[in-house]
């Protein structure tokens, strides 16, 4: 797994991530996706708290997610984040969650992030340094 511009982040499923059926609660997959996007930005030298101090934040605009197989307690997962579209004030990620032991696709998602002015909460252009660093297809 891993194309040229695909970033992967490992996540272990903890007991607290699971529901009464013993599988990961559906909303917790969104947390895993968020962690991977945060680490993706960090790997390119951008910390979200520092971006906020510079006047920008990235906010989720929309999410389309498919749950394919359940993840369970103690599974080791690999969460990918790959830029699929880079627009003036938004970036869209294709993300997958895979079980590391057998490469089973657990979930896939398309997440559109809007670049927002941190004080006015309106769309603002993605800074050139970020655009250059994260590239896209």
Image (tube, rainbow, N blue to C red):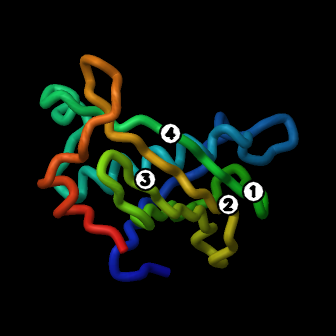
Q: Counting residues from the N terminus, which is met first, the one under dot 4 or under dot 1? A: 4
**Disc 2 marks which residue?**
107
For residue 131, above or below residue 118? below
In the rendered image, the quadrant that contains the C terminus is: bottom left
Q: Earlier in the sequence, mark 2 or mark 3?
A: 3
Disc 2: CA contacts within 10 A as few (<14), some (14-19) or many (>=20): many
Label 2 element class: strand
- The secondary structure type at the circle numbered 1 is strand
Q: Residues within 10 Å of mark 4 (few under 14, many from 20)?
A: few
Label 3 sits on residue? 36
**What residue is rendered at 19% in x and 35% in y?**
51
Q: Closer to us: mark 4 or mark 1?
A: 4
Numbered circle sitting on residue 61: 4
Q: Nearer the viewer, residue 106 or 88?
A: 88
Instruction: Tell me which label, 3 or 1, sits earlier in the chain.
Output: 3
Horizontal side, residue 124 vs residue 54: left or right: right
Residue 15: percent from left, percent from top? 67, 40
Distance of mark 2 from mark 3, alpha carbons? 14 Å
Mark 2 and mark 1: Cα distance apart in space? 5 Å
Relative side of 1 to 44, left or right: right
Please state the horizontal and vertical placement of residue 46, each as a whole percent of the image: 19, 47
**Quarter of image, res 119:** top left
Picture disc at residue 31: none
Residues 85 and 25: in front is 85
């Amino acid at each position: 797994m891993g194309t040229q511009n695909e970033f992967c982040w490992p996540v272990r499923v903890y007991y607290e991530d699971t529901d009464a059926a013993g599988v990961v609660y559906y909303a917790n997959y969104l947390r895993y996706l968020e962690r991977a996007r945060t680490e993706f930005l960090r790997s390119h030298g951008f910390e979200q708290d520092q971006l906020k101090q510079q006047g920008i934040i990235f906010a989720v605009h929309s999410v389309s997610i498919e749950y394919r197989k359940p993840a369970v307690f103690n599974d080791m997962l690999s969460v990918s984040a790959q830029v699929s579209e880079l627009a003036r004030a938004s970036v869209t990620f294709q993300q997958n969650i895979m079980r590391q032991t057998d490469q089973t696709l657990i979930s896939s998602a398309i997440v559109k992030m809007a670049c927002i002015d941190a004080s006015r909460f309106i769309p603002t252009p993605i800074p050139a340094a970020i655009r250059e660093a994260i590239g896209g297809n």
